[in-house]
C-alpha cells in the first residue's frame, strides 16, 4: 500500500517537472528574434541601430571611386562620410587627399587640417598636410608639418622624400639632399636632387647631380638616361636656340595656386611644377617623366626648326 502511494507521488513529481520544462519553449518565452525578418544580403554593412551606412563600407566605396577615376562620385561619398562621422579622422584625411589630387588645394588643406586636429600624432596625415601646403607654396608651414611627421615615424621614405622636395624648393639643397639620403641610396638621393635643381632651371647643377649619382653607382641607369636627355637638351636646343628663339625661354618654376589659376604662368621646357599628389615618390617619378619627355621633344623641335630656317 505504501509502495503504491510512493509510486503515485513520484509520477506526480515527474509530471510537474515536465510541465515546467515545456513552458521554456512556450510562445511567451521564445527568443526576441523569433518571427523577425532576416536582413537581405544588400542590407549587410549597414548599422541597424542608427540607419547609417557602415563607415568602413562607405570609405571603401569612396576609395574605389577615386581609384576608378570617378572623383565626382567619390566626393559624394566622402561628403556623406564626414556628415555622418564627423569625429573620424580617416574620412577627412582620405577626402583631403582626393581633393589635393584634383588641385582643390584650399579645400584639401581644410580637410587635412581637421584630420590632424582629430589625430595630432598621425604621421601619415601630417605628411599629407605638409605636401598639400607645399603645393600651395606655403613652404615654411609645409616643412613644419613634414618634420613633425618624420619625428613621429622616421621609417617612412615618402616623408623624407617630401621633406627633401620642400627643403630644395627653399634653395636649401644640402639639407634637401640629406633628407633624400634618409629615403634611399646616395645615387637615388643625387638623382632626386637633380630634378629639384631642374625645377629652378639650374640645368648645370642638375647634370652635376646626375654625374655624382653615377659616381656613387655606375649602374644607376635612371641617372645615365636622364643625363643623356639633359645633354641633348643643353647641346641641341640651347646650342641651336640662338637661331630658333629657344635661348631666352627661361623662367623659374611657379607653384600652382588656386587664386591665380586663371593666369597661366610661363615655364621653360624643363621647369614644371610637381603634379598634385599625396605621394612624393609619385610626384618625383612624374616629374622625371615630364622632364625627360620635355627635353627630348624640345631637342626634336629645335632641330626641325633649325633645318627649316636653313
Image (tube, rainbow, N blue to C red):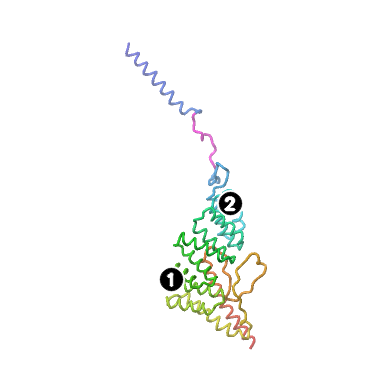
- How far across and how far down the image is residue 192, in percent? 49, 72
User: In the rendered structure, which segment of residues is drawn in magenta?
Assistant: 29-39
Whether residue 173 appears in magenta in the rendering, the answer is no
Q: Secondary structure at mark 2?
A: helix
Q: Is residue 212 above or below residue 68?
A: below
Q: Residues within 10 Å of mark 1 (few under 14, many from 20)?
A: some
- How far across and how far down the image is residue 152, in percent? 46, 59
Label 1 and label 2: CA atoms lie apart by 41 Å
Residue placed most toward the observer, 188 or 11: 188
Q: Is residue 60 visible?
A: no
Q: Residue at x 54, y 62 (%)?
A: 130
Q: Residue at x 59, y 67 (%)?
A: 137
Q: Is residue 301 visible?
A: yes
- Identify the residue under disc 1: 185
Residue placed most toward the observer, 93 or 58: 93
Q: Residue at x 35, y 16 (%)?
A: 7
The mark nearer the N terminus, 1 or 2, is 2
- How far across and how far down the image is residue 218, in percent? 42, 77
Q: Main secondary structure of the magenta part?
A: loop
Residue placed most toward the observer, 301 or 92: 92
Q: Is residue 105 left or right of residue 24?
A: right
Q: Is residue 33 above or below residue 236?
A: above
Q: Secondary structure at mark 1?
A: loop
Q: Is residue 284 above or below residue 149?
A: below
Q: Residues within 10 Å of mark 2 (few under 14, many from 20)?
A: some
Whether residue 38 appears in magenta in the rendering, the answer is yes
- Identify the residue under disc 2: 82
Amino acid at each position: 500500500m505504501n509502495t503504491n502511494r510512493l509510486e503515485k507521488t513520484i509520477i506526480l513529481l515527474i509530471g510537474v517537472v515536465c510541465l515546467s520544462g515545456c513552458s521554456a519553449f512556450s510562445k511567451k518565452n521564445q527568443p526576441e528574434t523569433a518571427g523577425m525578418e532576416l536582413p537581405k544580403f544588400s542590407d549587410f554593412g549597414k548599422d541597424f541601430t542608427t540607419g547609417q551606412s557602415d563607415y568602413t563600407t562607405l570609405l571603401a566605396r569612396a576609395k574605389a571611386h577615386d581609384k576608378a577615376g570617378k572623383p565626382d562620385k567619390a566626393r559624394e561619398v566622402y561628403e556623406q562620410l564626414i556628415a555622418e562621422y564627423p569625429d573620424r579622422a580617416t574620412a577627412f584625411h582620405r577626402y583631403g587627399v582626393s581633393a589635393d589630387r584634383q588641385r582643390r588645394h584650399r579645400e584639401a588643406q581644410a580637410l587635412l587640417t581637421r584630420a590632424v586636429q582629430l589625430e595630432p600624432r598621425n604621421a601619415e596625415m601630417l605628411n599629407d598636410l605638409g605636401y598639400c601646403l607645399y603645393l600651395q607654396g606655403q613652404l615654411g608651414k609645409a616643412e613644419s608639418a613634414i618634420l613633425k611627421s618624420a619625428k613621429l615615424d622616421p621609417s617612412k621614405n615618402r616623408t623624407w622624400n617630401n621633406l627633401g622636395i620642400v627643403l630644395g624648393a627653399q634653395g636649401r639643397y644640402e639639407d634637401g639632399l640629406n633628407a633624400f639620403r634618409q629615403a634611399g641610396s646616395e645615387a637615388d638621393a643625387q638623382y632626386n636632387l637633380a630634378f629639384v635643381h631642374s625645377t629652378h632651371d639650374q640645368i648645370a647643377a642638375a647634370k652635376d647631380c646626375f654625374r655624382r649619382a653615377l659616381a656613387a653607382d655606375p649602374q644607376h641607369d635612371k641617372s645615365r638616361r636622364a643625363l643623356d636627355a639633359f645633354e641633348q637638351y643643353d647641346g641641341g636646343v640651347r646650342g641651336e636656340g640662338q637661331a630658333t628663339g629657344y635661348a631666352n625661354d627661361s623662367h623659374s618654376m611657379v607653384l600652382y595656386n588656386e587664386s591665380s589659376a586663371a593666369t597661366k604662368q610661363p615655364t621653360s621646357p624643363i621647369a614644371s611644377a610637381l603634379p598634385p599628389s599625396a605621394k612624393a615618390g609619385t610626384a618625383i617619378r612624374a616629374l622625371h617623366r615630364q622632364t625627360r619627355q620635355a627635353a627630348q621633344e624640345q631637342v626634336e623641335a629645335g632641330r626641325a626648326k633649325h633645318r627649316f630656317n636653313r
